[in-house]
Image: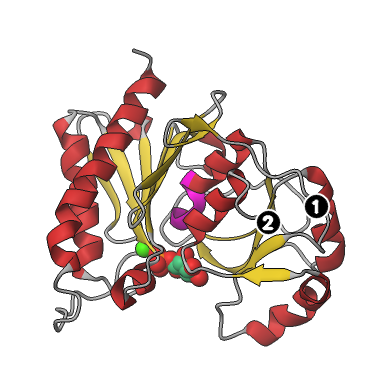
Amino acid sequence: MTKQADWLQILVECQKNIKNQISPLLKTLNQPQPNLGLGAGGDPIKQIDLAAENAIIATLKGYDVSFTLISEESGIKKYGENPNVCFVTADPIDGTTNLMRGIPFYATSIAVSTQPTLRTVHTALVTDLFHDIMYTAQRGKGAHRNDKAITPSTNYTLEEAVIGVDLNTYKVSKIAPQLSGLIRRTKHIRHFGANALEICYVADGTTDAFIDIRGKLRATDMSAAWLIAEEAGAKITTPTGKPLSIKLDPKQKVAFIAAANPKIHATILDLIKPEKEAK
Ligand code: IPD
Ligand code: CA
């Protein structure tokens, strides 16, 4: 088996174990939750986030691999004898608020790279934990939804499009002027609340674009979905159309436009016209 095939198998095993570990906790969400402090990404840690992260770590340890974990919850941790050759970037639960409120849209996201950089991600998995749908990608081998190869939509008219826009920020007045032209012209605007999964929806043609120009999303949330989108053939760039090139770190933030095809990507870019590149 190749190195990449091994990692895909390991990630599939990780998500199976996450599902097993969180299943009993799903029944206790209406009970008072312990205060576990803040995670490395800056949000309060929930018991269920930790259980999912522990499932990832236990699975990787079971395969006896060396790796550096870059996680939204516990930050950067090194495991094994040679942890600097493999980086596992994880958001154990993306969409924790949805999960806690019983909204059936949340995922786990895991990306494997040779450096702590987005560009070197070679294997990725995002699993919709409620509907049990698994998105995977390997560099150069395309992207899959369960076992089926996926491609984005070919639609490029805003009149027909379903476009996700994350407006989830107290500083919405800053980005609203940039987005208003696009929102005015788009028939269907959505935001479901788990950005990893929403990028996968662009990858498999469920939606036509997903836009997050807040500069607030953590790299841990989208590193796996980035490869899935790229491998499916979608176009995911900075808000000014440049390739995304970011460090993988729990504190790294990212702004992006994910679009199904170059035509709709160009239309969106033209309507958004950011004043300056998000750092
Ligand atoms: C959140 C979701 C949400 C986005 C937030 C993220 P989390 O991820 O992706 O859609 O608006 O910015 O933090 O915190 O549930 O992992
Ligand atoms: Ca999370």
State ligand 1's quadrant: bottom left
- For the record, the magenta segment spans 220-224
Residue at position x 33%, y 58% in the image: 130
Overall secondary structure of the magenta stretch? helix
Residue at position x 36%, y 54% in the image: 131
Q: Is residue 83 at least partly visible in the picture?
A: no
For label 1, the SS is helix
Q: Which mark is residue 109?
A: none
For label 2, the SS is strand
Q: Does residue 234 lie above or below 218 as drawn?
A: above
**Quadrant that contains the N terminus:** top left
Which residue is more in the foreground, 241 or 209?
209
Mark 2 highlights which residue? 209
Residue at position x 31%, y 45% in the image: 69
**Quadrant that contains the C terminus:** bottom right
Q: Does residue 236 lie above or below 171 as drawn?
A: above
Q: Which mark is residue 264?
A: 1
Disc 2 C-beta below 8 A from ligand 1: no
Asked whether, in this view, residue 273 is left or right of residue 50, the answer is: right
The quadrant in which residue 83 appears is top left
The quadrant in which residue 198 appears is bottom right
Asked whether, in this view, residue 181 is left or right of residue 35, the answer is: right
For the residues labelled 1 and 2, the Cα–Cα distance comes to 8 Å
Q: Mark 1 belongs to which amino acid? A: Ile
From the top left corner, tell me how far across and down residue 170 is, in percent: 56, 86
From the top left corner, tell me how far across and down residue 38 is, in percent: 28, 73
